[in-house]
Image (spheres, helix red, strand yellow):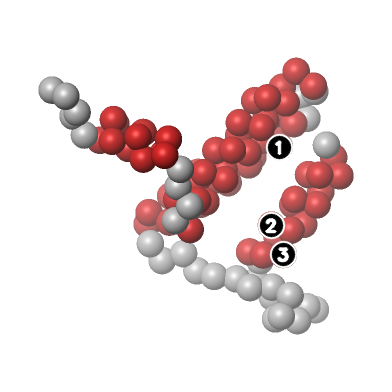
């Protein structure tokens, strides 16, 4: 799992970090989050990735919990990019609306 985590970390950092003086702007693209909703989703994704990293270090028995944290992080990012699955829509419907009452 360690090589996977290292590559994942490298890839994520390459995609979200601002260019430095030592690197070309072509290799990095950074951005500023201007919407509170997006910021909340990014913060939730970071928290889930942090929990994923912790769980993945706990051994074989915690791998299913680590995978769930990774799924949660992907779901949070999907809410920004527009990639949302049916379960997400149903969660919002049942949480935010009173259906059948």
SS for dot 3: helix
> Percent x, y for residue 5?
78, 44
Q: CA distance from mark 2 to mark 3?
A: 5 Å
Quadrant for the N terminus in the image? top right
Residue drawn where x is 13% and y is 22% of the image? 101
Q: Are marks 2 and 3 in contact (CB under 8 Å)?
A: yes
Residue nearest the viewer, comparing 44 with 88: 88
Residue nearest the viewer, comparing 68 with 6: 68
> Percent x, y for residue 59?
80, 23
Q: CA distance from mark 1 to mark 2?
A: 14 Å
Q: Which residue is mark 1?
A: 53
Residue drawn where x is 78% and y is 30% of the image? 57
Q: Quick check: can you spot residue 39? A: no
SS for dot 2: helix
The disc, 1 or 2, on the residue closer to the chain's N-terminal end is 2
> Percent x, y for residue 11?
74, 58
Q: Residue furthest right?
A: 3
Q: CA distance from mark 1 to mark 3?
A: 18 Å
Which dot marks residue 14? 3
From this view, report whether residue 95 is shown above or below residue 42: above
Which dot marks residue 12? 2
Dot 2 surroundings within 10 Å: few (below 14), some, or many (20 or more)? Answer: few
Q: Residue furthest left?
A: 101
Residue nearest the viewer, comparing 95 with 56: 95
Dot 3 surroundings within 10 Å: few (below 14), some, or many (20 or more)? Answer: some
Which dot marks residue 20? none
């Amino acid at each position: 799992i360690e090589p996977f985590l290292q590559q994942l970390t490298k890839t994520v950092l390459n995609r979200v970090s601002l260019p430095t003086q030592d690197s070309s702007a072509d290799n990095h693209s950074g951005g500023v989050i201007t919407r509170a909703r997006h910021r909340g989703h990014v913060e939730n994704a970071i928290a889930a990735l942090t929990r994923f990293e912790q769980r993945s270090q706990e051994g074989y028995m915690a791998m299913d919990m680590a995978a769930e944290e990774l799924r949660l992080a992907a779901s949070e990012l999907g809410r920004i990019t527009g990639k949302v699955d049916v379960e997400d829509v149903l969660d919002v419907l049942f949480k935010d609306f009173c259906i059948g009452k």
